[in-house]
Amino acid sequence: MTTTVSELLDMQRFVGRGEAAFAASKPADFDVGVNYRGSWETEWAGVQSSVRRHARALSTTGMPVWLVSHGHTMEYLDENGEIVSGFADHTKLAESVESEVGHLLACRHKQPLLAIEHRVFSPEAVLNIVYPARTGRIDPLFRRRVNATTILYTVFERAAPDDDVSRVVAAMGNLAEVWVPCERNRRVLIECGMDANRVVRMPHPTRPDDPVWHMRASRRGRLDAFAVSHCHAFRPQKLRFVNVGKWEPRKAQHEMLGGFLLAFRPGEHELVLKHNAFGQDWEGYPKSPQQSIHMWLQNSSVIDNGWTSQNVSTSIKVFGQPLPREALVRFLAESDVYVSAGRSEGFDMPALDAKILGLRLVVMGYGGAEDFATCSDVMGTSPLCSTHPGYGWKGATWSGHTAEDVASALKLAAEMEGDPDRPRVDIDTTQYTEAAVGQKMLERCLGIIARITPEFKFVPVKEYQDA
């Protein structure tokens, strides 16, 4: 059974995904568009950055996109440079966030064609989208038709099927499609019984003006010039290993620090860790990188390698303040090997940045960087183990790698860096551009609309496309 355009529009309006467009202080700019809902205001938060990137990517196709907040706690820097948490307040937005998605906040369309719900996976979040309490009395047939115009973009850090995912796959199947950032997420949903045709890998896009592209060119230019002047490929004697991420058990930075101390002696190489505090303590896990290093300095093998509290700071650098995007990219560009130490990732954005810049990767866990690692990168293959109980993920598993496993991988990466016959291998970066991801998003959206309302014809809005 097909649906008319007016019926299609009424579906999304009815469930409240476009109601604010009618109450806006300014008239609607466009007749139709897409509502993109998610938490997006914090500048340096990975998932919130993903919401901004995807909403913006879709908008570049000429499809009007209205970015709507879930209403949540955001983080920002106060006048003293301290991290402050508070209810999402657009007066506190960082300048970079405003410049990235400001035009999406002002967008108004009379009717939304589709709604994209962008959320971190949890059974409660999925069920609330599919069966919202506010429409609990609505006829089930109409509810299913509404879900047929709703896309869920979700991400999870689970390496294999588990009870939580299996429990809600049937509900997710009522939605038009489910988008995920990596192939492992996709395979887990399919293995739990979801229709493979309705689970789509939608990678994270990178803007054409992102500093990663400029620094990619300048970094490679410097290395090429060095190689020509010295008549050989550039092979630094002292490597800089680097990692970026929140301090939590899933990121396994404790094992990464131990692996570095087990793999090398003082002065051989350097490890730089850029982290953000997760905001909670984890049972059985060090509270900070400093505590982790102190613990490892008691290890007999680390002591035998010559490490002491006096010399460790010359080879391991740790800092935790948020960095502006350009500074973070420069920080990566000045390194040699990126260590993706996480036990399971939805999408490791710093690892992708590092790969675009030309760094070699060490990938210890599952998901994320698995999709863009090449034969020149070091891939861990540890068996699965149960996730940390503090996450509350019933039956979930992830990589069980140890510090010794990390040490072996770091040694191999150092050997590969020193071998001119094992150069770094590039990836096809075009699939991660804003234009490519936006076009893929548009094609999926139009495919959904065509199945429901064949009469609809999309006409790109040029003035919006150029915003």
Image (spheres, grey):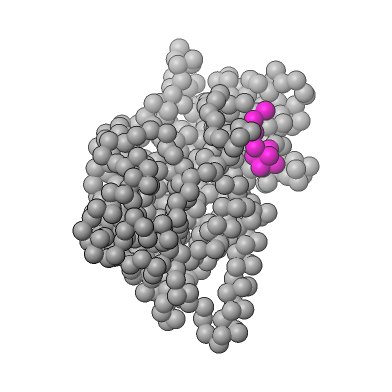
94 with respect to 153 (left or right): right
Q: Nearer the viewer, residue 50 or 237?
A: 237
- Tell me residue 217's x, y (percent): 63, 67
Q: Nearer the viewer, residue 215 or 438?
A: 215
251 with respect to 456 (left or right): left
Indicate whether residue 100 is drawn in magenta: yes
Can you see residue 152? no
Can you see residue 404? yes
For image coordinates 53% across by 58% down, the residue present is 332
Residue 18, compared with residue 371, is above or below; it is above
User: Farthest residue toward the bottom?
Assistant: 231
From the image, which quarter does the C terminus lie in?
Answer: top right
- Tell me residue 76's x, y (percent): 58, 34
In the image, the segment drawn in magenta is: 91-101
For image coordinates 65% across by 37% down, the residue present is 94
Residue 305, compared with residue 28, is above or below; it is below
User: Farthest residue toward the top?
Assistant: 137
For image coordinates 45% across by 75% down, the residue present is 237
